[in-house]
């Protein structure tokens, strides 16, 4: 059955294709973080205990949030894309939760979080507000390091480029996800070939 997220974000995947995409995305994210750790000489550290909570959104939904690592450590907030859930960050949690407090959550429409059916519930302003509420709840006194992938990156770009939220983010790392303004600037009349096909895909999404 289609969720609201699938209706809003593009052509629905079959169950098989969705599972294949999730496996590929998880592998991409884990390999990327492993390479960064290697380049920076960051060894994997013992994983701290996990805890979970629910966070309410501005329109009455509940988001499932997991916190990994020392609450006193700098907070790394990870935002997944579609059709994934927070488990895509399991490799990141294993690599970094001994050094950071790694916070993952299921965005609306995914995993254990509530799944509104109407497409208006998935507008970027709502998704960015969800992100802000999670950041405020898990790190009210300090800015968070933001890590995002795919459509998680799209909503994260929307949040970090909002001047009202700039103070909430210490850094932003995007994996395979552009700002939609960047997409729009590259999809003008002169756009042809593979770029045109990519622009058409983003437009449908």
Image (cartoon, rainbow, N blue to C red):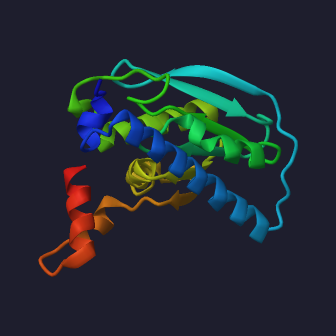
Q: Residue at x 55, y 58 (%)?
A: 172
The location of residue 105, given as percent across then percent down, is: 55, 33
- Quadrant of the frame with the N terminus: top left
Q: Nearer the viewer, residue 55 or 41?
A: 41
Q: Residue furthest bottom?
A: 190
Left or right: residue 204 compared with residue 51 = left
Q: Nearer the viewer, residue 84 or 162?
A: 84
Q: Nearer the viewer, residue 168 or 78?
A: 78
Q: Nearer the viewer, residue 79 or 146?
A: 79
On the question of residue 157 being in view, the answer is yes
Q: Residue furthest left?
A: 189
The location of residue 188, given as percent across then percent down, is: 16, 74
The location of residue 99, given as percent across then percent down, is: 81, 48
On the question of residue 186 being in view, the answer is no
Left or right: residue 199 compared with residue 86 = left
Q: How many marks?
A: 0
Task: Tell me which corner region of the image, top left, top right, bottom left or bottom right, holds residue 170.
Answer: bottom right
Left or right: residue 171 compared with residue 162 = right
Q: Residue at x 84, y 52 (%)?
A: 44
Left or right: residue 164 compared with residue 97 = left
Q: Looking at the image, is 23 positioned above or below residue 184?
A: above
Task: Tell me which corner region of the image, top left, top right, bottom left or bottom right, holds residue 37.
Answer: bottom right
The location of residue 112, given as percent across then percent down, is: 49, 22
Q: Looking at the image, is 123 positioned above or below residue 186?
A: above
Q: Residue at x 82, y 61 (%)?
A: 42
Q: Residue furthest front?
A: 16
């Amino acid at each position: 059955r289609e969720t609201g997220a699938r209706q809003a974000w593009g052509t629905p995947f079959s169950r098989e294709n969705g599972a294949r995409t999730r496996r590929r995305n998880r592998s991409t994210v884990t390999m990327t973080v492993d390479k960064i750790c290697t380049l920076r000489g960051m060894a994997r550290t013992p994983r701290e205990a996990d805890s979970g909570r629910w966070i309410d959104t501005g329109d009455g939904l509940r988001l499932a949030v997991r916190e990994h690592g020392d609450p006193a450590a700098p907070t790394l907030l990870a935002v997944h894309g579609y059709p994934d859930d927070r488990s895509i960050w399991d490799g990141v949690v294993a690599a970094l939760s001994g050094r950071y407090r790694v916070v993952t959550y299921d965005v609306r429409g995914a995993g254990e979080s509530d799944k509104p059916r109407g497409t208006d519930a998935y507008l970027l302003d709502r998704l960015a507000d969800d992100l802000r509420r999670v950041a405020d709840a898990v790190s009210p006194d300090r800015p968070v390091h933001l890590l995002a992938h795919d459509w998680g990156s799209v909503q994260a770009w929307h949040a970090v480029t909002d001047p009202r939220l700039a103070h909430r983010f210490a850094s932003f790392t995007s994996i395979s996800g552009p700002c939609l303004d960047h997409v729009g600037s590259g999809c003008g009349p002169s756009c042809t070939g593979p770029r045109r096909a990519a622009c058409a895909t983003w437009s449908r999404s």
